Amino acid sequence: MLIVQKFGGSSVADPARIGRVADRVAATVRDGHQVVVVVSAMGDTTDDLLALAGAVSANPAPRELDMLLSTGEQVSIALLSMALAARDCPAVSLTGGQAGIRTNGFYAKGKIIQIDTRRVRAELEKGRVVVVAGFQGVSEDGEITTLGRGGSDTTAVALAAALEAGLCEIYTDVDGVYTADPRVVPDARKLEVISHDEMLELASLGAVVLHPRAAELAKLYAVPLVVRSSFNNGPGTLIKEVDDMEQAAVVSGVAHDANVAKIGLFDVEDRPGIASRIFQELAREYVNVDMIIQGAMRDGRNDIAFTVSRDDLPRALEAVRRIQDQVGAKGITYDDGVAKISIVGAGMVSHPGVAAAMFEALAEAGINIAMISTSEIKVSCVIRREEIEEAVRVLHRKFKLGSGS
Ligand code: ADP
Ligand code: ASP
Ligand code: MG
């Protein structure tokens, strides 16, 4: 079988760990499988590179940042290939571009649009393990673009889809997908199975254990996916199509995202085309807008508030300031001290009262809700950032998700 194995930064943080990864990959090859490996940069390398950039420029060009960040993964692929060769396991390292990973041209937020798998297949045919740099690809213009923080997961799932791999394994520093971030909730429970839909919601709502785009591609291409620990042989969490809605948990997990900022436009004109104008301008800046609230106000005027990722706040503010007069907004405010807390569960749709229970638990803890949004399988609230960890624990307890409950 063809297996794609992805190892995150903590799994390749030092030479000893790279050695252990090589042992695992070599064992998979000995079991008779073809293996494509995707690796992240070692440990905190990506953060260190970002800090380096900040030390030479207050405002580094996105192109040069991507050029810099892409080097982190290149160190890992070369070292892992050497470690494999040292174990008599022939291997070849490939950058994203060499592996045929074509991205759209957006720096720092590149999306994989296509993978030309010829080179990877040819190397596999030669009996080699192919070690691919995660988190990067090359645009049509030959520009190196990265896929957003955590994007190596997406490289792995996209390669698994393109190669029609029998399995994609995401090896990380936790035993699988938990009911909440185990760093915040000590008694969080590991899930044996989770549906693609729930995984996509959890990932999109801040559970960094899987990159949202990886969850999206896994669902779209029905990639058989497992999240497991690189430090033990536990079975991990299987992500698959679960169709038994009757069995679905009302709430399967709590996700949180502290990387959120809120923007408000006050007293904008209440006429057709205003919202369209505002959000078109944000889309032009490639800012993803998350929650949107528009209050129907008095005297033909509206207030519109929305959230964006904190990294996008400066560009989002620039965009709305540019069109402030056009939409007749009397004022613009922003708040970068907020965070988003969410509950996710496929069974929610058939159980009224879940949102009410969430609001009740937050109220009991004295946590104020600034914004709310819901879908069939999730409820999200924007709250103060300093209250986010408390909120995660409170909701985890409320919905009895813990291993002790
Ligand atoms: P890697 O470097 O392997 O990609 P990440 O740090 O990106 O690892 O992702 C793993 C981390 O995700 C865990 O250490 C954990 O703190 C965090 N995490 C957040 N939410 C969850 C969750 N629901 N289940 C498991 N881990 C989670
Ligand atoms: N090295 C990149 C990051 O730290 C990509 C990844 O690890 O998935 O975000
Ligand atoms: Mg990650």
Image (spheres, helix red, strand yellow):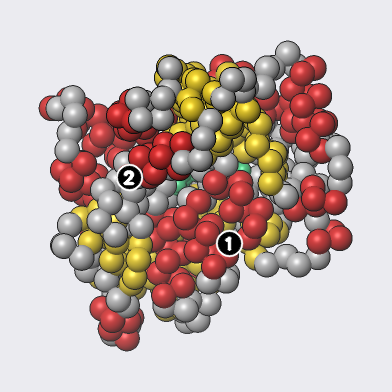
| Disc 1, SS | strand
222 or 238: nearer the viewer: 222
Res. 226 mark: 1
- Give how far across and how far down residue 71 sits, in percent: 21, 49
Q: Residue at x 80, y 56 (%)?
A: 248
- Mark 1 or mark 2, which has the lower sequence index? 1
Q: Residue at x 39, y 44 (%)?
A: 280
Q: Residue at x 77, y 44 (%)?
A: 251
166 or 261: nearer the viewer: 261
Disc 1 to disc 2: CB gap under 8 Å: no
- Give how far across and how far down residue 113 sits, in percent: 35, 66
Q: Quadrant of residue 332?
A: top left
Alpha carbons under labels 1 and 2: distance apart: 36 Å
- Give how far across and how far down residue 49 sits, in percent: 24, 36
| Residue found at the very far bottom of the displayed protein | 125
Quarter holding the C terminus is top right
| Residue found at the very far left of the displayed protein | 56
- Give how far across and how far down residue 357 sits, in percent: 82, 31
Q: Quadrant of residue 65?
A: top left
Res. 12 mark: none
